[in-house]
Image (spheres, rainbow, N blue to C red):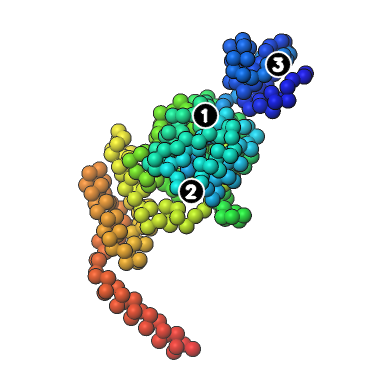
């Protein structure tokens, strides 16, 4: 079979071809009208033997970016060099003040840049969903990384009423791989309690591991900037089956600025209560989710208390008490005991800390 070299290189949609004569246009989503007149699209035409043309799903990659110039080139390379090449890579520049947009524009086709005023990652991702032309949408943060076979493996996992496919992740810093997510069980549940709890949620890291059908109605919450990925997954679980590629194909770049290290990161639990308020959940589901939130907040209550950050501690206590009254659930005893702690003035704790250091120093001297 002879064909134009550019056409061969541009078969991004993975066409399977065998048998009789058809005219096929490159760079098109192939269907019954694709054989009529490809010159309308400015594409080369070729004649090949075929009995059947089977198209594989097209993918739009959506990258929200705010001042992501430092790592954006590496991220874009990982997206454009996939073994299942995406139809397009949409960079939503969310009001960047660095040269992120210029870096993206250098790539040319299939990368395109859409600029907007700074409105947050959720608005940027939702804008990408609106602009996407692919049948499936893959999200990628501007500092994360995909292995070359990531999209190919996810497409192969699509079956029946699949709403989304995720991969395992590995956390890295520079060239060092810090941790790798272990394989998950074949019967892994994707229900609300499992997805809300970061200790059991199989969709780890940000949304960079997700490939989502554009047919699903779920959108990222624009009313919060905390825990948006988790809340999106909660909605996603109601849209169909979530499947997993049990390989660590998504690299999550670890920063000290991640929400687990951010003192305000506890507000994702406040956002989870607000999500419950906006959804029609049964009383049992409400109680399940509220109990999980309380358990997860234990760590944050301890951290705020021992950091002597009583303003943050009081805000968390008020959040829990208010939601307990509204949703009519009992705060677990382990959490309640933390909420009942006395908040003495800071100078009392400073005095105690100083005394403890003196006692500790005296003990060390006598033992030596």
Q: Which residue is drawn at 27% across and 51% down?
A: 320
* Pointer 2 or 1: first along the chain: 2
Q: Mark 3 points at which residue?
A: 46
Residue 43: percent from left, percent from top: 64, 19
The local crowd at label 1, few if under 14, some if 14 to 19, many if 20 or more residues have their Cα within 10 Å, is: many
Q: Residue 305 falls in which quadrant of the image?
A: bottom left
Relative to 216, residue 120 above or below: below
Mark 1 residue element: strand
- Residue drawn at x 38%, y 80% is 357
Q: Which residue is drawn at 40% across and 56% down?
A: 262
Q: Pick out the residue farthest to the right.
A: 1
Marks 1 and 3: which is nearer the front?
Answer: 3
In the rendered picture of this protein, how many numbered marks are placed on residues? 3
Q: Nearer the viewer, mark 2 or mark 1?
A: 2
On residue 98, the disc is: 2
Residue mark closest to the camera, 2 vs 3 = 2
Judged from the image, the secondary structure of the residue bearing numbered disc 2 is loop
Q: Check whether the beta carbons of the residues at disc 2 and disc 3 lie within 8 A of each other.
A: no
Q: Residues within 10 Å of mark 2 (few under 14, many from 20)?
A: few
Q: Which of 212 and 94 is in front in this view?
A: 94
Instruction: Indicate which disc, 2 or 3, sits on the residue closer to the N terminus.
Output: 3
Decide if residue 230 is in sight here: no
- Residue 85, how many percent across, how many down? 62, 32
Distance in Å between CA atoms under marks 1 and 3: 28 Å
Mark 2 to mark 3: distance in Å? 44 Å
Quadrant housing the N terminus: top right
Within the image, what quadrant is residue 154 found in?
A: top right
Q: Give the numbered dot on residue 136.
A: 1
């Amino acid at each position: 079979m002879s064909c134009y070299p550019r056409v061969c290189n541009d078969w991004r949609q993975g066409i399977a071809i065998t048998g009789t004569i058809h005219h096929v246009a490159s760079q098109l989503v192939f269907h019954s009208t694709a054989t009529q007149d490809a010159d309308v699209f400015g594409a080369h035409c070729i004649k090949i033997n075929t009995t059947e043309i089977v198209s594989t799903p097209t993918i739009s990659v959506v990258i929200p970016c705010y001042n992501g110039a430092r790592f954006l080139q590496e991220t874009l390379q990982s997206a454009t060099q996939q073994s299942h090449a995406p139809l397009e890579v949409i960079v939503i520049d969310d009001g960047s003040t660095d040269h992120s947009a210029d870096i993206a524009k250098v790539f040319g086709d299939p990368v395109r840049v859409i600029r907007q005023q700074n409105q947050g990652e959720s608005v940027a991702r939702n804008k990408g969903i609106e602009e996407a032309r692919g049948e499936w949408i893959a999200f990628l943060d501007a500092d994360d990384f995909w292995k070359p076979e990531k999209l190919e493996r996810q497409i192969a996992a699509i079956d029946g009423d699949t709403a989304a496919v995720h991969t395992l992740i590995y956390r890295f810093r520079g060239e060092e791989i810090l941790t790798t997510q272990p394989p998950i069980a074949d019967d892994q549940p994707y229900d609300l309690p499992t997805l809300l709890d970061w200790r059991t949620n199989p969709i780890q890291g940000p949304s960079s591991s997700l490939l989502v059908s554009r047919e699903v109605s779920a959108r990222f919450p624009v009313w919060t900037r905390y825990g948006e990925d988790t809340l999106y997954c909660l909605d996603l679980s109601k849209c169909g089956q979530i499947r997993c590629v049990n390989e660590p194909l998504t690299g999550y770049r670890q920063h000290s600025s991640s929400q687990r290290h951010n003192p305000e990161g506890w507000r994702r639990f406040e956002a989870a209560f607000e999500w419950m308020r906006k959804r029609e959940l049964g009383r049992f589901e409400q109680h399940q989710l509220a109990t999980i939130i309380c358990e997860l907040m234990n760590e944050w209550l301890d951290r705020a208390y021992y950091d002597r950050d009583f303003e943050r501690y009081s805000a968390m206590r008020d959040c829990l008490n208010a939601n307990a009254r509204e949703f009519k659930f009992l705060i677990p005893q382990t959490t309640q005991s933390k909420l009942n702690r006395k908040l003495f003035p800071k100078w009392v704790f400073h005095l105690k800390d100083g005394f403890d250091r003196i006692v500790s120093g005296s003990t060390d001297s006598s033992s030596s």
